Image (cartoon, helix red, strand yellow):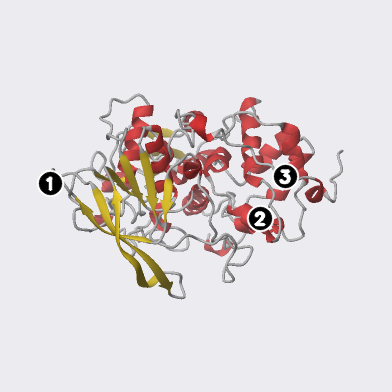
């Protein structure tokens, strides 16, 4: 057996699986990541793991991935056991390995004063090897129970809950209003960040495990909510938080201003072969309002559609290069980093507060933004409190504007008449067991916590499945997403 080297973190520099060259990848919709990587390099990266007495990387991971164990197994060249250990806490590690911002890396002990272990690249490599070697196969139960569970929504939370419940024998049906499965993984994340065949093969796995899927099915329309509850022993709402936040400014009704997710959905459908009328971008000045992941995806998509220039606007000031004093390790660092989209071109404008959309020639189409450059003071919770206007007369050319300023909860509540309630933030209210005010109706994912990460959705789905199973049978062997889950709730 290979013995770990106590100074691996000193002997090897951090090395990620690289992205493709920006000049090349911007010409297509293929994944931005390198298809191939060197196993020996990944083995060395596994050796960098310090096997800490207190593995803070695990506390940084919402699903409690036992990171040191699979780092060590990769170092020992035992990829099969590494895959098994990874799957013990994560149903879909390729979802996170390709799209997660890796809060586990920020919490790595090495990150205190050095480059952290390349956890995300190792995770991705493990699952890539698993698929290549044919190790990832269906795991149907030995026998079925008589319990029927309906899962509403087929994003990461819904798929995770469905798989966990099917594997303990329950009869699971997933209802999806779209024509294809995957939720925002399908229609929200661009192909160049996450190839949709990665969803399809997991769907095939779930079908082989006994999960039934109903697409083009709107719960509350095609299937009345009361009928769904009556026909199932339990229901889990995992509908996401896709109600987009809009902006109320003069000129908002001008042509050429779009909600970001509408643009991304359209582009994903086009890449899937659907006949869509594309928003005209080629040769145009594009402005993206919002500095988050959705905004970055709009920037990158506009590059691929031939925009002449793309400006991404953030209302806050540019984050610092180094951690501020009130943001210590192992918290997620509030520092600046260039996104993959900005690597491909375009520009960023920070501390810009848009005041109006302007039609300069009277044709009913937006031509520019009137804006102010500002500085902010913040309250103790980090929310913007007061602004100081530094420059009141910014004019930003814009032939197309994409509003990417977040989401405000589920788009609707078909279970409202049954008693499912929303909180002030628009999300479904649940108790500690993830049950809504309606007996037997549970909720999970962004529908309950608001816009969040894929890794959180997977954890929510695992926890919801655990509580559904306990509700149906009086006990459960399904694991929690984190060891801190309270067993007395079951």
Left or right: 298 in relation to 31 = left
Disc with the residue nearer the chain's start (2 vs 1): 2
Residue hosting label 1: 362
The N terminus: image quadrant: top right
List x then y, in percent, for residue 267: 35, 33
Mark 2 vs mark 1: give the one in front.
1
Query: Which is nearer the N-term, disc 3 or disc 1?
Result: 3
Category of crowding for the residue at label 1, using alpha-carbon neighbours closer than 10 angstroms: few (below 14), some (14–19), many (at least 20): few
Instruction: Decide which of 111, 317 is in the foreground and name it.
Output: 317
Q: Which residue is mark 2?
A: 57
**Image coords of residue 345 (percent x, y):** 46, 41
Confirm or deny contact between disc 3 and disc 1 (CB under 8 A).
no
Query: Residue at the location (56% across, 33% down)?
Result: 20
Q: Residue furthest left?
A: 362
Residue 184 located left or right of residue 485: left
In the displayed structure, 375 sits above or below 201; it is below
* Label 1 element class: loop
Q: Would residue 409 appear left or right of 465 to someone viewing this image?
A: left
């Amino acid at each position: 057996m290979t013995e770990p080297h106590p100074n691996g973190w000193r002997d090897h520099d951090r090395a990620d699986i690289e992205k493709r060259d920006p000049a090349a990848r911007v010409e297509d919709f293929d994944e931005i990541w390198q298809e191939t990587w060197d196993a020996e390099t990944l083995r060395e990266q596994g050796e960098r793991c310090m096997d800490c007495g207190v593995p803070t990387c695990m506390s940084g991971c919402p699903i409690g991935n036992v990171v040191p164990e699979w780092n060590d197994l990769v170092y020992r060249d035992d990829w099969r056991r590494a895959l098994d250990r990874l799957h013990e806490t994560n149903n879909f590690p390729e979802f996170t390995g390709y799209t997660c911002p890796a809060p586990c890396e920020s919490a790595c002990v090495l990150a205190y004063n050095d480059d952290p272990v390349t956890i995300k690249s190792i995770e991705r490599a493990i699952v890539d090897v698993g698929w290549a070697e044919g190790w990832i196969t269906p795991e149907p139960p030995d026998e079925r129970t008589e319990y029927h569970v309906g899962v509403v929504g087929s994003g990461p939370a819904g798929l995770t809950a469905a798989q966990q419940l099917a594997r303990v024998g329950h009869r699971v049906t997933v209802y999806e209003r779209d024509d294809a499965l995957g939720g925002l993984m399908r229609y929200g994340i661009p192909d160049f960040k996450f190839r949709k065949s990665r969803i399809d093969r997991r769907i095939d796995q779930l079908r082989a495990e006994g999960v039934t899927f109903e697409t083009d099915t709107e719960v509350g329309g095609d299937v009345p909510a009361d009928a769904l509850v009556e026909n199932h022993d339990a229901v889990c709402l995992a509908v996401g938080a896709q109600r987009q936040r809009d902006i109320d400014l003069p000129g908002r009704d001008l042509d050429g201003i779009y909600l970001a997710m509408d643009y991304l959905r359209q582009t994903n459908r086009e890449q899937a072969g659907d006949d869509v009328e594309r928003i005209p971008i080629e040769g145009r000045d594009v402005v993206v309002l919002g500095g988050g992941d959705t905004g970055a995806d709009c920037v990158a998509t506009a590059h691929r559609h031939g925009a002449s220039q793309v400006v991404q606007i953030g209302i806050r000031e540019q984050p610092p290069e180094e951690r501020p004093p009130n943001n210590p390790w192992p918290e997620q660092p509030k520092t600046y980093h260039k996104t993959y989209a900005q690597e491909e071109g375009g520009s960023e404008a920070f501390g810009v507060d848009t005041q109006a959309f302007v039609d300069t020639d009277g044709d009913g189409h937006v031509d520019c933004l009137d804006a102010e450059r500002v500085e902010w003071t913040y309250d103790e919770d980090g929310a913007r409190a007061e602004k100081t206007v530094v420059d009141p007369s910014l004019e930003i050319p814009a032939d197309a504007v994409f509003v990417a300023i977040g989401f405000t909860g589920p788009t609707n509540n078909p279970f409202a008449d049954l008693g499912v309630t929303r909180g002030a933030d628009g999300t479904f209210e649940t108790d500690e067991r993830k049950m809504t005010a309606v007996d037997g109706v549970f909720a999970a994912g962004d529908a309950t916590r608001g816009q969040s990460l894929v890794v959180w959705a997977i954890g929510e789905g695992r926890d919801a499945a655990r509580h559904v199973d306990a509700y149906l049978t009086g006990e459960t062997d399904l694991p929690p997403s984190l060891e801190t889950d309270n067993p007395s709730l079951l």
